[in-house]
Image (spheres, helix red, strand yellow):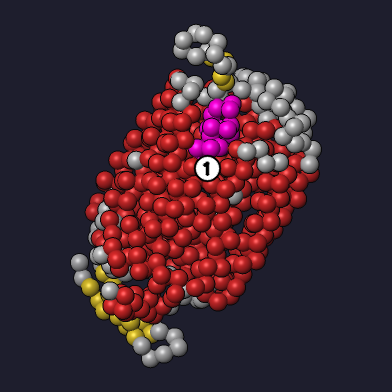
C-alpha cells in the first residue's frame, strides 16, 4: 500500500493541511474493505434489529390489540434512549463502533422476545416495559455507531448515496416484517387478530393479538443473526475511501477526554443547536402515524397493507432525496436549499391532506369494538396514499438530517457526538409523544403538535444551511476542534 502526501489549501488563510492518499486494496480484500460493502453490512445489522422493531411498531401496538402496553414500553424505551444517547458518542469513541454495534444490537432480541412472552402470558406487560427500557440504552449505542460510520465512510459527494443505500436496506427489515403480517391477515376483516384464552383456559381476561407466536419467533431468530454481523465487520481504521483518503479513528483514548468532547463539540460548532428542533421532530410523528391513524382507523388487513407500503415508500424516499443531495452538477449549498424546500412542501402536503381525515374521528368516536375500515371500503385508496406519503416524508426527513450533519464535519469522533445529540433529542421527543398517546391525549392535539414541530424544525435549520453548508467541508474546522479539545482538557484536568 503506497502513500502520497498532498497539501490541500484551506480557504481564508495560508494554512495547509497534509492529506495522505492511499492505494486501495484489490481483489477479495478490496471488496471486503470497500466502504460500500461495510455500509451494506451496517444496513443488514439494522435490517434485522431496528428494522423488525419498526415492523412491529408500524402495526400499532407492537402487534397487540391493547396499544397501552406497547405505548408505555415505547415511552420507557425512548426515555432511556434519550438519556443514554447523549453520552453514547463518547462511549462509541472509547469502545469503537464494532463493539458499540454489538452491544447496541443485543437489546432487540430481548424486546421482540418480550412480545412473544406476552402472547403466551397475557400478564407479562411489565416485562415488555422493562425490555423497552433496556433496549433504549442499547439503541443509543447502535445508532450512534451507525451514524458515525455511515457519515465518515463516503466522500463528500457520496454521502447522499451512502445514507440512501443504508436507509433502503434498513427499511427492508420493516418491509419483510410487514409482508409476513399481511400474509397472515390477508383474508381477515376483523379489527384484531386471532382470539385466544389464557393458558389456564379460565376466562380471566380476554386477549386479542395481531400476530402469532410463529411470527415473533421468526423475528427473534433474525434479530439474533443481526447481533452477530458486527463481529465480521472491518475496523474503520482499515477503510480507504474512494478518493484514497483513510477513515480517521476517534482521537481520544480516555473517558474524560470524550466527556470534554461533548462540550467542545457544542463550543466549536454551536450551529448544531439550531438543528435540535429538527432532531426533536424526527420521531415525534410516529405515534400519530402508527397508533392514532393506522391502528385507530383500519382493520387488521388494511393495517398490515398500510404498514407494508409505508416501509416500501421509505426506500423510495431515502434513495430519491439522497440522489438529489448528491447531484454534482449543482453546488452543495444549492442542493441543501433544494432539499430543504422539498421537505417544506412534503410537510404541508402531507399534513393538510391528513387534517381532513383527522377531523372526521376522535378517540371517543372509535371505540375498540368499532367497525374499522377495510381495504375494499370506499375512501380507502385516498387514505393508503396518504400513508405512502407519510413514509416518503419520514425517509426524506431522516436522510436530510444525516446529510446536513455530514456536511458539517468529516471527523468520525465529532460525528459521533452529533449523532449522539441527534438520537438523544429525537428519543426524548418520542418518549413524550408515546406517553401522551398512552394517557389518551386527543388525536387532534397529537396531530397538530406533529405538524407544528416539523415546520419549526425546518425554520430553525435554515440558518444552519446558510452558515455551515459550504462547497466543501473545511478540514481546518475539525483541526481546530481537535486543538481546542486538547487545550480544554489541559485546562480542566
* Residue drawn at point x = 45 percent, y = 20 percent: 121
* Residue drawn at point x = 49 percent, y = 42 percent: 76
Q: Secondary structure at mark 1?
A: helix
**From the image, which quarter does the N terminus lie in?**
bottom left
* Left or right placement of residue 11 versus residue 461 in this view: left
Neighbour class for label 1 at 10 Å: few (<14), some, many (≥20)?
many
Q: Is residue 12 above or below residue 390?
A: below
Quickly name the residue at label 1.
Answer: 75
Q: Is residue 169 above or below residue 246?
A: above
Q: Return the x and y of residue 331 as percentages of the image width and height.
A: 55, 73
**Is any atom of residue 62 visible in this view?**
yes
Q: Nearer the viewer, residue 131 or 317?
A: 131
Q: Is residue 231 above or below residue 116?
A: below
Q: Say which quarter of the image contains residue 150.
A: bottom left
* Residue drawn at point x = 32 percent, y = 65 percent: 258
The overriding secondary structure of the stretch rendered in magenta is helix
* Residue drawn at point x = 31 percent, y = 60 percent: 93
Q: Say which quarter of the image contains residue 96.
A: bottom left
Magenta-highlighted residues: 57-75
Q: Return the x and y of residue 487 as percentages of the image width and height.
A: 32, 79
Q: Say which quarter of the image contains residue 312.
A: top right
Q: Return the x and y of residue 456 as percentages of the image width and height.
A: 65, 62
Name the residue furthest top: 201
Q: Is residue 334 magenta?
A: no
Q: Return the x and y of residue 346 as percentages of the image width and height.
A: 67, 55
Name the residue furthest bottom: 14
**Is any atom of residue 375 visible in this view?**
no
**From the image, which quarter does the C terminus lie in?**
bottom left
Q: Nearer the viewer, residue 219 or 199?
A: 199
Amino acid at each position: 500500500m503506497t502513500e502520497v502526501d498532498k497539501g490541500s489549501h484551506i480557504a481564508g488563510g495560508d494554512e495547509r493541511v497534509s492529506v495522505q492518499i492511499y492505494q486501495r486494496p484489490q481483489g477479495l480484500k478490496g471488496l471486503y474493505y470497500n466502504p460500500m460493502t461495510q455500509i451494506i453490512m451496517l444496513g443488514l445489522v439494522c435490517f434485522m434489529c431496528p428494522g423488525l422493531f419498526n415492523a412491529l411498531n408500524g402495526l400499532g401496538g407492537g402487534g397487540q390489540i391493547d396499544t397501552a402496553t406497547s405505548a408505555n414500553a415505547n415511552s420507557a424505551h425512548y426515555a432511556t434512549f434519550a438519556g443514554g444517547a447523549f453520552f453514547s458518542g463518547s462511549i462509541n469513541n472509547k469502545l469503537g463502533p464494532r463493539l458499540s454495534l454489538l452491544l447496541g444490537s443485543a437489546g432487540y432480541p430481548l424486546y421482540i422476545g418480550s412480545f412473544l412472552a406476552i402472547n403466551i402470558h397475557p400478564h407479562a406487560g411489565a416485562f415488555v416495559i422493562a425490555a423497552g427500557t433496556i433496549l433504549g440504552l442499547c439503541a443509543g449505542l447502535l445508532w450512534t455507531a451507525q451514524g458515525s460510520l455511515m457519515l465518515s465512510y463516503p466522500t463528500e459527494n457520496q454521502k447522499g448515496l451512502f445514507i440512501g443505500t443504508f436507509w433502503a436496506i434498513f427499511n427492508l427489515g420493516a418491509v419483510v416484517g410487514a409482508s409476513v403480517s399481511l400474509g397472515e391477515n390477508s383474508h381477515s376483516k376483523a379489527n384484531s387478530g386471532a382470539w385466544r384464552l389464557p393458558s389456564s383456559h379460565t376466562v380471566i381476561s380476554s386477549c386479542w393479538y395481531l400476530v402469532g407466536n410463529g411470527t415473533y419467533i421468526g423475528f427473534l431468530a433474525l434479530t439474533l443473526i443481526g447481533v452477530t454481523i458486527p463481529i465480521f465487520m472491518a475496523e474503520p481504521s482499515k477503510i480507504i475511501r474512494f478518493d484514497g483518503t483513510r477513515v480517521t479513528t476517534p482521537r481520544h483514548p480516555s473517558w474524560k477526554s470524550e466527556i470534554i468532547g461533548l462540550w467542545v463539540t457544542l463550543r466549536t460548532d454551536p450551529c448544531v443547536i439550531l438543528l435540535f428542533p429538527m432532531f426533536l421532530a424526527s420521531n415525534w410523528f410516529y405515534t400519530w402515524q402508527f397508533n392514532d391513524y393506522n391502528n385507530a382507523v383500519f382493520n387488521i388487513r388494511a393495517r398490515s397493507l398500510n404498514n407494508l407500503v409505508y416501509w416500501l415508500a421509505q426506500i423510495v424516499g431515502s434513495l430519491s432525496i439522497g440522489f438529489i443531495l448528491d447531484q454534482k452538477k449543482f453546488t452543495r449549498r444549492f442542493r441543501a436549499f433544494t432539499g430543504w424546500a422539498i421537505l417544506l412542501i412534503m410537510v404541508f402536503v402531507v399534513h393538510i391532506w391528513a387534517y381532513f381525515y383527522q377531523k372526521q374521528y376522535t378517540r371517543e368516536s372509535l371505540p375498540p369494538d368499532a367497525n374499522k375500515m377495510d381495504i375494499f371500503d370506499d375512501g380507502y385508496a385516498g387514505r393508503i396514499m396518504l400513508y405512502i406519503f407519510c413514509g416518503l416524508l419520514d425517509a426524506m426527513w431522516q436522510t436530510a438530517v444525516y446529510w446536513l450533519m455530514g456536511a458539517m464535519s468529516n471527523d468520525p469522533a465529532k460525528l459521533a457526538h452529533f449523532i449522539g445529540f441527534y438520537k438523544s433529542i429525537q428519543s426524548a421527543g418520542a418518549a413524550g409523544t408515546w406517553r401522551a398517546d398512552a394517557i389518551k391525549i386527543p388525536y387532534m392535539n397529537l396531530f397538530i403538535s406533529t405538524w407544528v414541530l416539523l415546520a419549526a424544525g425546518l425554520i430553525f435549520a435554515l440558518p444552519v444551511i446558510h452558515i455551515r453548508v459550504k462547497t466543501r467541508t473545511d478540514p481546518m474546522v475539525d483541526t481546530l476542534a481537535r486543538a481546542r479539545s486538547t487545550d480544554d482538557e489541559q485546562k480542566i484536568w
